[in-house]
Amino acid sequence: LEVDKWKGKRLNLIAETVAGGSEWKTRTRLSDEMSDEDLVYREEYRPQFHFSPRRGWTNDPNGLVYYKGIYHLFFQHNPYGTSWGNMTWGHAVSNDLLHWTEKPDAVIPDKNGVIFSGSAVVDWKNTSGLQKKPVKDKSGNIENPPLVAFYTSTGANRGKGPSAQSMVYSLDEGNTWFKYPRNPVIPHIIGGNRDPKVFWYEEKKNTNGNQGKWIMALYMDKEDYALFSSGNLIRWEKICDIKDMGCSECPDMFELPVDGDKDNTRWVFWGGNGKYLIGTFDGITFKKEGGPFDAKHGGNDYAAQTYSDIPASDGRRIMFSWMSGGQYPGMPFNQQFTVPRNLTLRETPQGIRLVIEPVKELESLRVSNPVTLSVKLKGNEIPVNIPDLKGELLDIEFLFNLKNSESRDTSKTINIEIFGQTISYRKNINTIEMEGIRAPLTPVDGKIKIRLITDRTSVEMFANDGSVQIAKCFVNSRKSPASVVISGNQDLESFEATVYNLRSVWKR
Ligand code: FRU
């Protein structure tokens, strides 16, 4: 526990339940250094470019907000153990979404309970009035707006307290956070209602262009969600129900252009396990047009959240997701996030769908001089080994050309083995599969594109430019050297591969 902020004060340590033989009294000490200072980020199973907590447990990404060139990443954190518990908001910052510096925990449990998931926004117009000394520039914009975050307080009174929505704010660009004194801002409504995701809704019809309001998407109970609105981030009223999502927890909601056309937008409503609705939103009612659709098909991928306040000049919808269920044997930390992804909407033969791709920043980790390969197959299923591979951090782009024939071959059209993980595609059922996780995929102009990104404990697959993405954790023992083996049946004509090594973000 970092105790800096209580410097000069008296510290009372109270142990409530102590196991027999506990050494807590003799092993507790005060130090100016973290006990693992020279070992941290050098551990055997430390993800090399995926976010993971310095130590302790994480699950959901929280409070993703961009402000003044910095991506803030808060995360569900157990600072005191490697399994779920003591929920606290950890905090890390980055200027490229890849190199993270962990800061002291931002929001710690209090009399209202522990700190569950939520979101953060920049209150540009100081609608909350939380900035008591606003400084305005020449055009009247506030130069020091408050950053405001929402989370679920739950489990006060030794776990019995209900869940309610609380607020914290920062007046120093996200460094330190104060609890709002009259928390919770939304008292308990139903069940385990939780995970507030707040965003600013700009009123489009308004001609002077600066009217709007805050919207909060909230998980209610069972498979139901609701929307709330507010003018000042403090008083909230319910405006709309969103029912039967086919999932629970961790909502997100955002507007995106279809195929980049700003005059043709849709709203996406997103739930904990990656089910999403496509629809319209007029500031009061979300009207569903389609869904729930599946953005993921299983795998290690849950409770994703997108960034707030990405500048319009960038315009991306950037998402992190928890790679739930990964194993990190013997490590002082537990769990990691996916690579950052960018979400767009694409018109497909089946209708409008989300497309999910790694952000372009990831390419900055590519080491130059990739291994390239172009192979014409003779329909003989002879495996092709990509030669000269080194390292475990790979970013591979495959382009597979399928034969034009109408064959009924039911065997694997494409098969890739990488670090003991299998990725395959079957043309007869238009299905891609990674380690038993299946998703529909149809060739585009007779081609299948597959991008694979491997880290020490995970592989992520993106097919046909993000129409399908699957994330999978595994423990790479690294006993054997890197090997990527490709085979195919008579329907595969040829393939090209470009294999980049990726740099670790921890090289110091
Ligand atoms: C999702 C979740 C959230 C909750 C948080 C608690 O993984 O269950 O609904 O806020 O984790 O850690």
Image: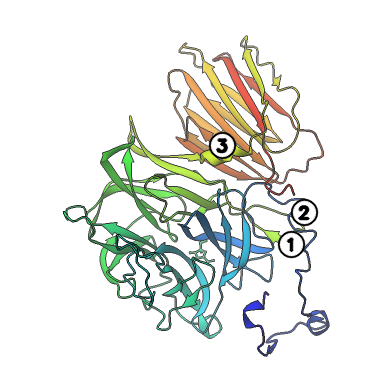
Above-or-below relation of 468 to 142: above
Above-or-below relation of 294 to 489: below
Structure colour scheme: rainbow
- Can residue 427 be seen here? The reply is no
Mark 3 and mark 2 in contact? Answer it, CB < 8 Å: no
In the image shown, does 216 or 408 lie closer to the viewer? 216
In the shown orientation, is residue 207 left or right of residue 39? left
Alpha carbon separation for disc pair 2 and 1: 9 Å
Question: Residue at image x 75%, y 35%?
Answer: 391
- Using a 10 Å C-alpha cutoff, classify the residue at mark 2 as few (fewer than 14 neighbours), some (14 to 19) or many (20 or more): few
Alpha carbon separation for disc pair 3 and 2: 25 Å
Q: Which of marks 2 and 3 precedes in the sequence?
A: 2
Question: Residue at image x 62%, y 49%?
Answer: 50
Residue 461, which numbered label? Answer: 3
In the image shown, does 144 or 506 lie closer to the viewer? 144
Amino acid, disc 2 = Glu
Amino acid, disc 3 = Met
- Which residue is tagged 2? 43
In which quadrant is the N terminus drawn? Answer: bottom right
How many numbered discs, if any? Answer: 3
In the shown orientation, is residue 154 left or right of residue 55? left
Residue 95, which numbered label? Answer: none
Q: Which of marks 3 and 1 precedes in the sequence?
A: 1
Amino acid, disc 1 = Pro
Residue 332, which numbered label? Answer: 1
- Using a 10 Å C-alpha cutoff, classify the residue at mark 1 as few (fewer than 14 neighbours), some (14 to 19) or many (20 or more): some
- Location of residue 122 in the rendering, given as x and y in whole percent from the top left corner: 40, 63
SS for callout 1? loop
- Location of residue 400 in the rendering, given as x and y in whole percent from the top left corner: 55, 20
